[in-house]
Image (cartoon, coloured by chain):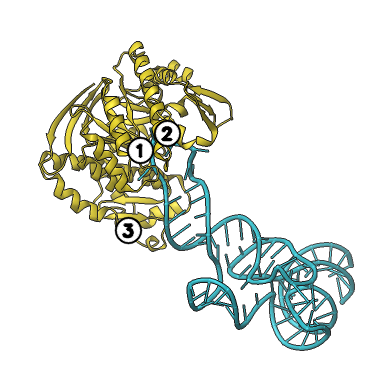
Chain colours: A yellow, B cyan
Amino acid sequence: MKFEVVKRDISTSARSGIISTGHGAIETPVFMPVGTAGTVKAVHQRELRDDLNAKIILGNTYHLYLRPGIEIIRQAGGLHRFMNWDRPILTDSGGYQVFSLANIRKLTEEGAMFSSHIDGSKHMFTPESIVEIQRAIGADIIMALDECTTWPSDHKTAKKSLDLTHQWLARGAGHFERTEPLYGHEQDFFPIVQGSVYKDLREASAHEICSYPAGGYAIGGLSVGEPAEVMYEMVDAVTNILPADKPRYLMGVGTPVNLLESIALGIDMFDCVIPTRNGRNGMLFSRNGIMNMRNNKWKDDFTALDPDGTCFVDRQYSKAYLRHLIISKEILGAQIASLHNLSFYLWLMEESGKKIREGRFGKWKNEMISRLSQRI
RNA sequence: GGGGAGAUACCAAAGUGGCCAACUGGGGCAGACUGUAAAUCUGCUGGCUGAUGCCUUCGUAGGUUCGAAUCCUGCUCUCCCCA
């Protein structure tokens, strides 16, 4: 993997660059649609590529391992071929499931013991096995197994959790070095910063993970309940420690405003379920604010879904029609909302890159932020 | 014509003397959702009120009772069976 910073913003720490992978180039800043189980929910691969022009998507190790199972993915020739997606894929390690499935897992120094949320069967994930699985999936970017520390956690607990993440990183990185890609394309390994909401832990973690040569570096364990301001402080604390010539990935973030603020702090990559999940639940994001499509006020609004939108659905369908679909729980409603939200997120990233390259990001960002969080 | 069953809030449907402004489901209204156990979850849904509370409601008109959606009587309407 290569990363080239093309341009730095003047008034903020934002930068725009290009990541080169075995499955093509990715312009940054980039938003990566989340496709947990080998599908970005409600969106065809064809739409992802031709309508949205998504440059990279996510998959999830835990989910794919449980179903369909790694042997099937291996037989298919990797996830790219299995799902017919020829652009880059990043797989999350299952670190987030350590957090979100806390009630059905047990952590040991060895790894994480999970009860499957599907059938209750027990499975052990270790830093090494998680690398093996991601090798078999064929992800272009492989994430280290980490413990996404719960919030709130006191300093002592957060430190203990961080130590475990670091121990796991040492083993995972070592195993990555000892193993080879299975399908002929390059794979890169990203370590993850943890440290909860404690600046000293975050800084120490950033220094620690930088001691491992890697294609890029991620920041995890944020947007798990802490106030947004705290999240920005934690991001700000580590971006200058992480190498400037490697992409920085803020995991699981976030709202459109979160994205712009984080870009300003020097983040290059994002992923989040918000555009798809909230879309399925009727929430639409646009450059003029947020709409809850289930609200009664849209029932007879036959104007275009989003006159300023960049996706075909934005002009093809009305607000009243989408409201009807969402209220009726029609599948097409989820599809339209997901397409719209993803296209908006991708537009926001593209536009950010453009403003950075024009040296006007800071001012534009502040103007956008006041509009983006409005409820309309 | 004879016999039987029933009428509860927007809809369906519990309740059959006080714990009932009334279970539950649907519908409606609003909210939540951040590396997806999520096409999910939560709240409200007679009126007024910040809350306590007050007022009006279980087809309709009376009655019994300290107290009635619940018991009794008349009336209206609906459904089923027999002729």
User: On the picture, is B17 further left or further right than A334?
Assistant: right
Q: Chain of mark 1?
A: A
Q: Which residue is mark 1?
A: A252
Name the amino acid, label 3: Arg
The vertical placement of A311 against A242, above or below, is below
Residue A270 x %, y %: 29, 36
Q: Which residue is mark 3?
A: A375
Residue A132 x %, y %: 41, 17
The vertical placement of B17 against A9, above or below, is below
Query: Marks 2 and 1: CB-CB under 8 Å?
Result: yes
Binning the other alpha carbons within 10 Å of mark 1 as few (below 14), some (14 to 19) or many (20 upward) gives many
Q: Earlier in the sequence, mark 2 or mark 1?
A: 2
The disc at residue A96 is 2
Name the amino acid, label 1: Gly
User: On the picture, is A300 further left or further right than A8?
Assistant: right
Rounded to the nearest whole Å, what is the CA distance between mark 1 and mark 3? Answer: 23 Å
Quarter of the image that includes the N terminus of chain A: top left
Q: Earlier in the sequence, mark 1 or mark 3?
A: 1
